[in-house]
Amino acid sequence: QVQLVESGGGLVQPGGSLRLSCAASGSIFSINTMGWYRQAPGKERELVASITSGGSTNYADSVKGRFTISRDNAKNTVYLQMNNLKPEDTAVYYCNADLILTLSARYYSRNSWGQGTQVTVSS
């Protein structure tokens, strides 16, 4: 069993900051790419940022220069530092991970999602 547990969402004023965390737990051998997605009401889920196991990052154009993704491989945790937040950043933010699981000396790949955390940017 694998779990991705997100935390750090909430209500913030425009221009404010939030830091999201996502911790993976379970029978994990390794984690490849980890990422953050978001889904606003009435819109499709979109990639916000991703980071490979080697630390290479990718950002949506709308968040470049404001958001920073990082990870702690020892803790199986990915972070999203969000600065200068705007009302259009309001969405449910989801963590995603490409996992290599181990069970009985065998290895399995799995793509997993967290449950989502609400981020609301409003005055």
Image: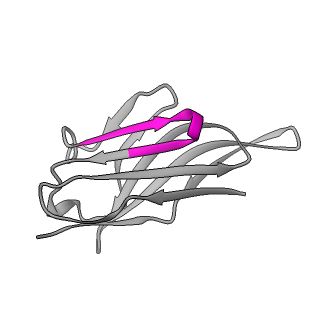
Considering only vertical position in the picture, is 13 above or below 107? below
Dominant secondary structure of the magenta stretch?
strand
Nearer to us in this view, 7 or 39: 7
118 vs 114, left or right, is: left
26 vs 67, left or right, is: right
Circle count: 0
Q: How is the image coloured?
A: one colour
Q: Quadrant of the C terminus?
A: bottom left
Residue 107 drawn in magenta? no
Considering only vertical position in the picture, is 74 above or below 37? above
Magenta region: which residues? 67-79
Residue 38 location in percent, x, y? 35, 59
Residue at left 40%, top 41%? 50
Considering only vertical position in the picture, is 90 above or below 19? below
Nearer to us in this view, 83 or 116: 83
Residue 117 location in percent, x, y? 40, 65
Q: Quadrant of the N terminus?
A: bottom right
Nearer to us in this view, 111 or 87: 87
Residue 74 drawn in magenta? yes
What is the residue that sits farthest to the bottom in this orientation? 42
81 vs 109, left or right, is: left
Residue 27 location in percent, x, y? 74, 47
What is the residue that sits farthest to the top in this orientation? 54
Residue 17 location in percent, x, y? 22, 52
